[in-house]
Image: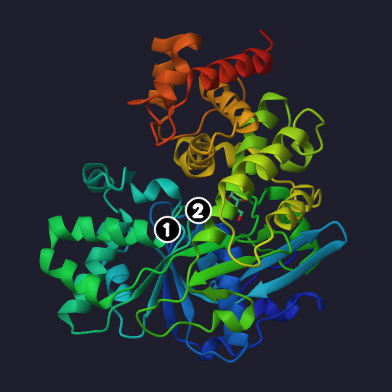
Amino acid sequence: MSAPPRLAPATVERLNREVERPGYDRDAQGIGIVHLGIGAFHRAHQAVFTDDAMAAGDRDWGIAGVSLRSAAVRDSLVPQDGLYLLDERAPAGDLLRLVGAVRQVLVAPEQPAELTALIAAATTRVVTLTVTEKAYFRSGEGIDLTEAEAAGNSIYAVLARGLAERQAQGLAGLSLVSCDNLANNGAVLARGMSAWLEKHAPALRRWFEAECACPATMVDRIVPATTPADRDRIAAAAGVRDEAAVVTEPFRQWVIEDRFAGPRPGWEKVGAELVADVAPFEAAKLRMLNGAHSALAYLGLLAGHRFVHQAIADPAIAPVVERLMRQEAATSLTPAPGQDLGAYADALLARFGNHALPHSLAQIATDGSQKIPQRWLEPLAVNAGQGRASPATLRALAAFLLHVRGDGAPVNDPMAERLAACWAEAGRDGIVAAVLGPGGVLASDWVPSEADRRTIEAAMRELAGS
Ligand code: CS2
């Protein structure tokens, strides 16, 4: 049998019949959204909601996707004219669909002028972002301008160039929609943008604050990195070869603050929830889902597991993760009316157990220093303030500290060197204070008590087997 042809508009007719197709005339749609950070998560989440919104009748919300650094996604998507397959994997079977929403892909360092022109186009009304936690350069309540400036194509520099052009042309402002896993992601982006503009273009800062909006969002869909084996399996099932295919779970959720600067796709017609206040949903997701994920990652890697579904099946790990979700994360939250945190924990456990979707623990363990503050340290501070112990979260912290010492998988973290230096200087007796104490690398509102320090040290001894 000959190899399947490469996915492209001309080969769409070769797709097997069961693959779902975009329910709209793709060639008739203009671009309305610029997306920064066109990785797998965006392609499995916001692009799918937008694809559905266009199928439901909304027009001209095609997406121009931007990579801030690497050319890999552009190189896989452009030969396919932006088309890719989404493989929704469940124990009961797979659902394959072709997504048509992405119309253009750019690499920021290679095409700065085109990127500015796209952000400044009159037809662009929304910019969405999935750039990961570290790309915001958070520092306390603000941003670290020096670090952001050193980064070259930071989100702030890229957006500022496009916004300046819009202002110069007398165009309307934009809605800038952060879809990263940060508490108050809209406010983080707005504050960072204001700080950047205050230094680099003060008049543009006033225009930005008056004309643009940064709604907060909670995004949720588990999207493991696509593997070569996934691409082979999808080619066999679809009948065409897709170098940009994405694998995910059936579940998806998007809660969006209903505060836009102008028009937006009708995402609420296709399952998104437009609400006045995202905070209770964002906090529950960060502390329960992502908090449990990070605990599974560090405890699981130390125990020799590779995937989430294996770690959650380990009788030494599952009770810790359940306790973290139900008795530590959930107790730190103030649920919105109707928000059932017990049912949420049940649903999360079922999603973690999806063995049809192997989700690498090493992927989740990446950038822990950027994730742990909102996932673990904020709930620890709330619980400590209310006199509640958090032994499961402390055990997870012990596993994180061992991980950054190098006990398990390779450490992939912008603070890896600083954390390794803490271990070298402080050793096991001083590591808790050096990382988590006042002035420590991850200093936060939560200051470990003496009892917390002893609990973490005992857990480290136990987990390291010494
Ligand atoms: C994960 C998230 O890699 C991680 O840190 O916890 O990417 C998680 O899979 C998503 O937030 C789920 O919506």
Q: Position of residue 333 (x, y in %)?
A: 57, 51
> From the Cβ of disc 2, is ligand 1 less than 8 Å away?
yes
Dividing the picture into quadrants, the one containing residue 189 is bottom left
Q: Residue at x 61, y 64 (%)?
A: 44
Q: Are marks 1 and 2 in contact (CB under 8 Å)?
A: yes
**Disc on res. 185:** 1
The answer to which of 363 and 283 lies nearer the viewer is 283
Tag 1: amino acid: Asn
Spatial CA distance of label 1 from label 2 is 7 Å
Dividing the picture into quadrants, the one containing residue 79 is bottom right
Residue 250 vs 351, above or below: the answer is below
In the rendered image, the quadrant that contains the N terminus is bottom right
> Can residue 307 be seen here?
no
Q: Position of residue 7 (x, y in %)?
A: 65, 70
Local secondary structure at mark 2:
loop
Q: Residues within 10 Å of mark 1 (few under 14, many from 20)?
A: many
> Can residue 119 be seen here?
yes
Local secondary structure at mark 1:
helix
Residue sitting farthest toward the front: 387
Q: In this figure, what is the number of numbered marks?
A: 2
Q: Residue at x 15, y 59 (%)?
A: 198
The answer to which of 376 and 94 lies nearer the viewer is 376
Q: Residue at x 77, y 75 (%)?
A: 19
Residue 112 vs 441, above or below: the answer is below
Tag 2: amino acid: Asn
For residue 132, side relative to residue 341 (left or right):
left
**Disc on res. 160:** none
Q: Position of residue 371 (x, y in %)?
A: 49, 42
**Disc on res. 181:** 2
